[in-house]
């Protein structure tokens, strides 16, 4: 299982909150302290805490100026930021991914920006960074906001800086199972004063909101645990890197399983260990491999979501607003003509059903055992 | 009787049919329905592990639907 995740100052900080008698998030309490510590750790001007990263995807879509009739460019492997776009009545559009990393392809992003595009959401998927410098250039050239989804990317280096600081906004998740956790929770970072103010204004309001806002406020309890976790998270990541190395070694010499590429200048904050099944090119049966993985007793996922996000009904059908057709199907404000169709992102469509994933946020000892199971599964499958 | 000790089509179909009929549901509801429909007394952990593998299915697959809840997704 994972490393000793709650052996820091969590209880001490929680005790202080209960003694204070005030549990709601406060700027002069643990929420403010966590925001300042997070901003300092990332070397940015602003950090805005919320009850969930999902909330911040919604808030940052608004902050980027995206609303009815606007497009938000998403990558198709995960759905969260596209759902955030729907919450602002904006239309998710899609850029393809690279065949070796499964991260957003900057050239596909460039090709899919239209006059309606207000923002690009790029996911630093499963602990590896996209080509953030290239994507930032695309965003700047086309005057759109680049928002990095860093839910899987705590303290993830990319060409000398952390992921989350290349885009105009970086959004981190603290839900259970992330590098650091507060149960649920999230943080947005930015150096842009106006974007920070707009995110904050819709993430939590007092009495009379300037825009349509809600209460996505983080509680003091979440922030207290977050602060204790932040003090230790780099140690967790080092352990997960050792676990990742163990799992990677199990793929060595296997011609029909393609490891995920880590390109030059890219760090790795392991979140999910992922590789690609190419057995059909070598006479190796996928069902036999699945059976062998099942027999290991460990958890493996084959095919992830199976299809890109744009093939899910939430996006293909007018379901988002009570079947009324918003935002994509009958929007009177939309002047574009974006077509959801098969083959929209051919690399994502080809890669997704072949992805083989397992959790790598585990101790090195656990990873050794899982890696042994993977070796056995490979051997069993090859023997037929 | 369903066999949860290895992946097999009959068991996978049965569990996905059950989740499809129940709508959004818990593993405990699936466990009870397996017993009622098939006479299979499944251990909860064994069932959940099997259901996790059914997230790899196509064109039908199981998906998480919030804490402790499951849903059937039909992709084709």
Image (cartoon, coloured by chain):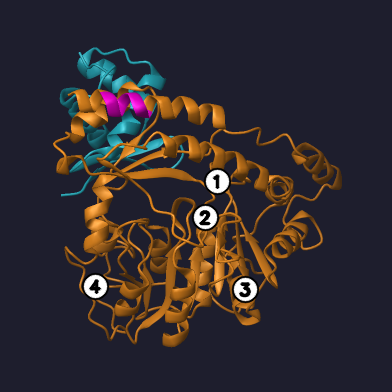
Chain colours: A orange, B cyan
> Which residue is painted at 31% across and 21% down in the image?
A295
Which mark sits nearer the N-terminus, 1 or 4?
A: 1
Q: Please provide the residue range marked out in magenta.
A: A374-379
Chain to which mark 2 belongs: A
The mark that comes first in sequence, 1 or 3, is 1
Subunit that carries the residue with mark 1: A
Q: Name the N-terminal-most of marks 4 and 2.
A: 2
Mark toward the viewer: 2 or 3 = 2
Q: Name which residue lies at 63% across and 46% down.
A: A182
Do tag 1 and tag 3 residues touch (Cβ < 8 Å)? no
Residue A200 sits above or below residue A224 on the image: below
Residue A94 visible in the picture = yes
- Whole-angstrom CA distance, mark 1 to mark 3, is 26 Å
Residue A311 on image: x %, y %:
23, 58
Spatial distance from mark 1 to mark 2, Cα to Cα?
7 Å
Relative to A313, residue B8 above or below: above
Badge 1 element: loop
Which badge, 2 or 3, is on the more N-terminal residue? 2
Q: Quadrant of the N terminus of chain A?
A: top right
Residue placed under numbered mark 2 in the picture: A151
Return the residue at label 1: A178
How far is the residue under mark 2 from the one under mark 3? 22 Å
Indicate the quadrant containing the C terminus of chain A: top left, top right, bottom left or bottom right: top left
Q: Are marks 3 and 4 on the same chain?
A: yes
Horizontally, residue A30 falls left or right of residue A283, namely right
Q: Badge 2 local density, few (<14 within 10 Å), some, or many (20+)?
A: many
Q: Which residue is mark 3?
A: A201
């Amino acid at each position: 299982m994972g490393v000793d995740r709650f052996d820091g100052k969590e209880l001490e900080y929680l005790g202080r909150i209960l003694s204070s008698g005030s549990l709601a998030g406060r700027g002069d309490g643990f929420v403010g302290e966590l925001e300042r510590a997070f901003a300092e750790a990332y070397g940015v001007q602003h950090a805005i805490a919320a009850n969930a990263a999902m909330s911040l995807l919604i808030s940052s879509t608004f902050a980027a100026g995206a609303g009815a009739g606007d497009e938000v460019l998403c990558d198709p492997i995960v759905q969260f930021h596209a759902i955030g776009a729907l919450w602002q009545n904006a239309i998710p559009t899609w850029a393809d991914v690279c065949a070796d990393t499964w991260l957003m392809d900057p050239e596909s992003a460039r090709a899919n920006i239209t006059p309606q595009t207000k923002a690009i959401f790029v996911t630093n998927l499963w602990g590896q960074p996209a080509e953030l410098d290239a994507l930032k250039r695309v965003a700047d050239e086309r005057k759109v906001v680049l928002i990095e989804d860093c839910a899987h990317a705590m303290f993830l280096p990319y060409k000398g800086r952390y992921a989350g600081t290349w885009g105009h906004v970086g959004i981190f998740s603290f839900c259970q199972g992330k590098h650091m956790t507060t149960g649920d929770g999230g943080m947005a970072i930015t150096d842009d004063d106006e974007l920070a103010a707009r995110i904050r204004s819709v993430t939590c309001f007092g009495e009379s909101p300037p825009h349509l806002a809600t209460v996505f406020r983080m509680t003091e309890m979440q922030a207290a645990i977050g602060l204790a976790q932040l003090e230790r998270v780099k140690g967790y990541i080092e352990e997960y890197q050792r676990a990742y190395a163990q799992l990677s070694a199990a793929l060595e010499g296997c011609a029909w399983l393609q490891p995920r590429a880590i390109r030059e200048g890219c760090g790795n904050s392991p979140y999910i260990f992922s590789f690609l099944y190419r057995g059909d090119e070598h006479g190796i049966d996928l069902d036999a491999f699945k059976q062998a993985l099942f027999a290991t007793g460990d958890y493996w996922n084959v095919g992830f979501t199976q299809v890109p996000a744009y093939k899910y009904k939430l996006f293909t059908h007018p379901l988002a607003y009570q079947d009324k057709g918003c935002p994509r199907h009958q929007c009177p404000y939309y002047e574009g003509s974006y077509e959801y169709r098969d083959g929209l992102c051919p690399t994502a469509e080809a890669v997704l059903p072949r992805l083989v994933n397992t959790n790598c946020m585990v101790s090195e000892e656990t990873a050794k055992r899982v890696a042994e199971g993977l070796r056995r599964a490979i051997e069993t499958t090859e023997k037929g | 009787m369903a066999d949860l000790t290895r992946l097999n089509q009959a068991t996978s179909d049965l569990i996905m049919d059950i989740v499809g009929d129940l709508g959004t549901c818990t593993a405990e509801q699936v466990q009870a329905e397996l017993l009622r429909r098939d006479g299979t007394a499944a251990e909860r952990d064994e069932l959940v592990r099997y259901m996790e593998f059914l997230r790899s299915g196509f064109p039908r697959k199981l998906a998480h639907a919030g804490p402790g809840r499951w849903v059937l997704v039909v992709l084709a």
